[in-house]
Image (cartoon, helix red, strand yellow):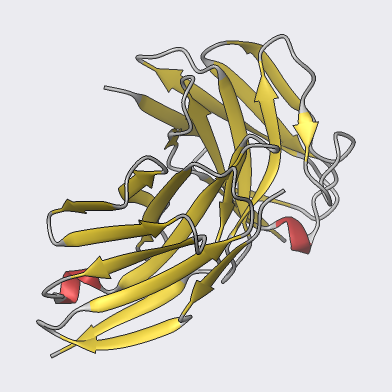
Amino acid sequence: GALVYQYPRRTICKSGTSMRMECQAVGFQATSVAWYRQSPQKTFELIALSTVNSAIKYEQNFTQEKFPISHPNLSFSSMTVLNAYLEDRGLYLCGARVGGAEQFFGPGTRLTVL
Amino acid sequence: GEQVEQLPSILRVQEGSSASINCTYENSASNYFPWYKQEPGENPKLIIDIRSNMERKQTQGLIVLLDKKAKRFSLHITDTQPGDSAMYFCAAWDNYAQGLTFGLGTRVSVFP
C-alpha cells in the first residue's frame, strides 16, 4: 500500500535557527507533494505545492525565502523552516498525490520553537 | 482559491446518538471532499471521502452527503461511541492551488 514517511517526527529548535524536515513516499511515485502546517489549536494551512520539474507554488503568507522546498525525485521532498520563531511552531504535514486528488499524509513533523 | 466553512465548532452528543457536521465551500469546480479525524497529538487520518460524481457514501457507521447545488457536504456519525470523540476536519480540493483547503474543525465529544 501507499505509505508516506516524515522525518523527524518531533523536533525542537532555538528561536532564530532553522530546521529541515523530510517527506518520503514509499510504494508509489508521488506526482506532487503538498506541505501543510497546523498551528496549535488551529486548522491546516496549505504552505506550498511541489511538483517534480515544475516551479514550487507557494500560498499567500508563505514564501520560498522562509520555507525553501527541495523535490529532487518522485519519492522525496524536503522543506526547511528558516529562522524559526514562535509562530512557526506546529505540526507540518506532507501530502503526496498520485495523479488524482486523494492525498496520502505522512505522520507529520511536530516543531517546537524555544 | 477555495474557502471552507465548518460548523459546529463544538459538538457534544450522547453515546448511541448521531452526530452531524456540516461544511460549505465556495468553488463549484472543487470535486473532492475528504473528512479527517484527528486524535490529540496525532496527525489527521482520512476516515471517508466523496467525489463530485456522488451524492452519498457510507462506510462503517459514517455517512457523507454532498449537495453540489448548495455547495454543501456533511458527515454523519451514526451510533456514536466514546472512541468517536476527536477533532474532525472537512476539506475541499482546491483546483487552483492543487491542494486541500480545510475547515476549522469540529471538536466532537461523546458522553455516556
Q: Is residue A65 above or below residue A23?
A: below
Where does residue A90 sit, x and y in percent of width and height?
62, 57
Q: Nearer the viewer, residue A7 or B109?
A: B109
Give residue A55's position: percent from left, percent from top. Answer: 80, 19
Q: Residue at x 74, y 56 (%)?
A: A88
* Residue B16 at x, y percent in the picture: 9, 82
Task: Kindly indicate the quadrant of the structure image that contains residue B106.
Answer: bottom left
How many numbered callouts?
0
Quadrant position of the C terminus of chain B in the picture: bottom left
Establish if B111 lies above or below A49. Answer: below
Which residue appears farthest toward the right when viewing the image?
A65
Q: Position of residue A19 (x, y in %)?
A: 71, 38
Query: For this view, does B78 lie left or right of residue A60?
Result: left
Q: Residue at x 72, y 9 (%)?
A: A53
Q: Residue at x 76, y 53 (%)?
A: A14
Q: Residue at x 22, y 69 (%)?
A: B77
Q: Residue placed farthest to the front in the image?
A: B69
Q: Nearer the viewer, residue B57 or B16?
A: B57
Q: Is residue A58 above or below residue A40?
A: above
Q: A72 or B70, which is in the foreground?
A: B70
